[in-house]
Structure formats: structure tokens, C-alpha cells
Amino acid sequence: MELFIKRLTPTDIDKRLAIPTNSLVYFPGFRGNHSVDLKVKDKSHRLWTFRCSIRKKRYLKPVFSSGWLEFVRSNNLRIGDKVSVRLEQGHVSGVEYGIEVQRKIRLLGKDVWADVL
């Protein structure tokens, strides 16, 4: 099940990935903490750990911080790329989340989205 899709911004590439607040219901409870580490699997089956953090105040503003920039650099992500995070069906390996990245390319005179990962 797809949790969110986002086109990457300069902040997403250089600092952290801001994620939609409504997707927080699909992440484990923070239990009084302001961050939780998530295991995420890309299409090549590599496991990544992203720290999902929220603010301490009223407006939560969730972000993927620690681990996110390593993912960006390892996969040469760019501004405008499209990231899709989904909830995985099988929880056998303990991985509950998947991530895909697409980039808009021009093919035979048409714009199409191609998988980066």
C-alpha cells in the first residue's frame, strides 16, 4: 500500500525529506519519543535505515533525517525525482517499508517516468 509520493525539492536533496503528516499513522508509535528508526527496502533489496523525526510542539512536521542523505547520495537523486514510500505486505524479514524512485525522462518526444532504483 502506497503511503506517499513526493517530488524531491532542494531541501529534500540537501538536508532531510519532509513527509506528509497524514502518513504518520502507518509508522510505529513514537511512545513519547520524537524519533523512530525505520527499515526501508529499495527495489534492489538493499536495506536502509531512515530516522523519522517529529517536532516536540503542536505541528509535528515529520521528516526522514538520519540515513536519508546517504540514500540520496548513493542513488544520485536529483531535484524533481519522484519518491514513493509504501507499506510492504510480507513482514517475514522485519522490513515493513519499501521505497522507489523515478526520474522524468524524454523518450521518443514524450515525458515518461523511469525507475532510478
Image (cartoon, grey):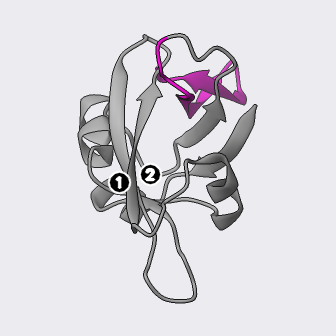
Q: Quadrant of residue 63?
A: bottom left
Q: Is residue 52 magenta?
A: no
Residue 97 is drawn in which quadrant?
A: top right
Residue 23 pos. (x, y %): 67, 55
Vertical comparison of 8 with 76: above or below: below
- Percent of width and height locating residue 31: 48, 62
In front of the other: 88 or 94 = 94
Q: Which residue bears the numbered disc 2? A: 79
Residue at left 44%, top 51%? 79
Q: Which stretch did the figure color magenta?
A: 93-117
Crowding near the residue tagged with mark 2, few <14, some 14–19, many ≥20 C-alpha atoms within 10 Å = some
The relative height of residue 79 versus residue 2 in the rendered view (above or below) is below
Label the magenta part by its dominant secondary structure: strand
Front-lying residue, 86 or 34: 34
Looking at the image, residue 66 sits to the left or right of residue 109; the answer is left
The label shown at residue 13 is: 1
Could you tell me how many numbered marks the image carries?
Answer: 2
Dot 2 amino acid type: Ile
* Label 2, label 1: how far apart the Cα atoms are: 7 Å
The image position of residue 78, as x and y in percent, is 40, 44
The tag on residue 48 is none
